Amino acid sequence: MTPAERIVAALPRDGGRPRLIPYLMAGFPRLDLTVELLLAAEAGGAALVELGLPHSDPLADGPTIQAAGQTALREGTTVARALAQLATARSRGLAVPVVCMSHLNPLLQFGLESFCSAAGQAGVDGLVVPDLPLEELAELARCASRTGLGICTMVAPTTPDSRIELAAARASGFLYCVSRTGVTGAGGSGEGQELLRRARARTEVPLALGFGVRERAQIDALTGLAEAVVVGTRFVEAAAAEDPVSAVRELGVSLSG
Amino acid sequence: MTGPGPLIITAPPVAGRYGEFGGSFVPETVVPALQELEAAAVAAFADPAFRDEFYRLEATYAGRPTPLYLAGRLSAGAGYPIWLKREDLLHTGAHKLNNALGQMLLAQRMGKRRIVAETGAGQHGLATATAAALLGFECTVYMGREDMRRQAINVSKMGLLGARVEPVGSGSATLKDATSEAIRDWVTNVRDTHYVIGSAVGPHPYPWLVRTLQSVIGSEARAQIQEAVGALPQVVVASVGGGSNAIGIFAAFLDDAAVRLLGVEAGGRGPGDGAHGASLSRGRSGVLHGSRSLLLQDADGQVLPTHSISAGLDYPGVGPEHAQLQRSGRADYQVIDDAEAISAFHLLTRSEGIIPALESSHAVAAAVRLGASARGGPVLVCLSGRGDKDLETVLGARGGE
């Protein structure tokens, strides 16, 4: 199985409750905790983990994840160190697929080709790059396909149907459905259901809804509509708790069970 | 000359590319809005009614054409004639109003009711708040906390004009962070909101749109200097932060191969990381705020802090067309540091009775040190803004000496 295929296999279309994708910021709250937090997310019932790489200027992120990224950068988190944490987690038994979420510039400076190769070796299965729209995707897609990495393209409530088809055709892994116009963080899943219906009518690719998903009831309400939900800001809040490892595991259990 | 401009209207670059630079690196949520904006701008520029309304406001409200002035005493000192394109005389005191008026007429055509903008020195925020008051838009301006402190008068003016000024405390609390926050607001409210970006930066079509609206500076200046001296300038000099006044004046001279185009970046306190804003001279290719250009960044692709005594040049990126003009050799770019800019500020004030913005002072500094390379032809300087906003900074710098 290629990494992209592992993502698809982890998110079966069984009509059930959406599976849980926790988002963790690499290097937050401390670089050396990332290994433990990845394992805690899996222990808490994650079907897949989204690992964010910090950026100084994250256009797609709200205040909580921005602040976590700043902390991670102060911790000395780099692309290479984040991947090393993941590789360690894999060596300690982390089995669920991992998608890396990064803004484009850190990947460009690492080199797209080198990044895809290093990411594949570290145990990354797919990529989410929120400031890389379909029109600019070709080079990364070429590099990712060499190592079998998936690319989870994004659609938003403002995306017209014809573009949803294009995004789904370019997706390998899941299609990341952004629940509302805006950035990550508080605010409910707004127009998510309508977007999921439009996407489902056009693709067989697994659908994951993200941005503003915080509560168990929100996830319950998406049964049959999405194969997964990405919960970001709440997991970052949990990682900021006094005992981050327990908090992340317990939040996972409370949302996934 | 009689009327303003005209606009130099070109087809938008394919895929927003200027060589390897440009493009559109933004969240999917705003991609359809950018496509809509490009189509609306192309249609508007082709529509005589739109152009006439823009020229009418530029002439009767903003004060175009702005004069071209031969700075006699400055020229005598330099040893060659220096002509100033007086954008400092435009309503609100800088070239920024050209862009704000044009974009807001476009927003009106697109049926938007709300405007967001970022501002550094406050000049773009002031121009945007002014045009919003004129045309009846709700307006929010994002401004770094540090810049709000440095430019308190512009903050008060924006408030009087009815704009809401949102302080930005994240990152370095300056223009870069205000821009990120304005983009986040736009991503959230994209359906009814237009983002009036203040410089020739950002995702396509903004660099092209802003350059087109600012090209009135260049087309006026080219006609005016030909009328005045019967020749083209030997050198055209303009300051470059994001680069909108520079690309606006350069636009009229790109095809005049004999005319040297000289952009002037902020040298700040020196060449160390975080001490300047010279992205063309010292940056590497990267992506910030939606386009690929030259960028001040560390080895990991994190954007570096910047410094300039001029808040408007205190920015780690630059418009992608400038990156390409430098790469192709059509334009060249120099660095003027804080101390040289302040000297030029005093020089122009004392010799001509014109108090220039600190941004424009960088261009003046470069123009007076051209030396032998400028002999035999006039030098044209874009005096992009007036210096009222900078008095506290300049007097503070002198007190500290």
Image (tube, coloured by chain):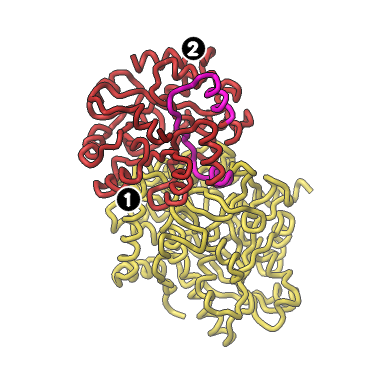
Query: Where does residue B204 sit, x and y in percent of width and height?
Result: 42, 57
Q: Mark 2 lies on which chain?
A: A
Magenta highlight range:
A84-111
**Which mark is drawn over residue A246?**
2
Res. B345 image quadrant: bottom right
Q: Which residue is drawn at 54% across and 76% down?
A: B253
Q: Which of A256 and B209 is in front in this view?
A: A256
**Secondary element at image label 2:** helix
Tell me, yes or no, if residue A60 can be seen here. Answer: no
Q: Which chain carries label 1?
A: B
Tell me, yes or no, if residue A202 can be seen here. Answer: yes
The residues bearing labels 2 and 1 have C-alpha atoms spaced at a distance of 42 Å
Is B312 left or right of A160, judged from the image as shown? right
**Secondary element at image label 1:** helix
Q: Which chain is red?
A: A
Badge 1 amino acid: Pro
Placement of B209 over or under A20, stated as above or below: below
Are the residues flagged by discs 2 and 1 in contact, CB closer than 8 Å?
no
Q: Name the residue under label 1.
A: B32
Q: Nearer the viewer, residue B130 or A158?
A: A158
Query: Where does residue B13 sit, x and y in percent of width and height?
Result: 42, 65
Badge 2 amino acid: Ser
Res. B102 image quadrant: bottom left
Query: Where does residue A177 sit, x and y in percent of width and height?
Result: 32, 36
Please say whether residue B98 is one of the residues in the magenta stretch.
Answer: no
Is A208 left or right of B266, judged from the image as shown? left
Please say whether residue A99 is one of the residues in the magenta stretch.
Answer: yes
Q: Which chain is yellow?
A: B
| Residue lying furthest front | A1
Query: Where does residue B376 sit, x and y in percent of width and height?
Result: 69, 83
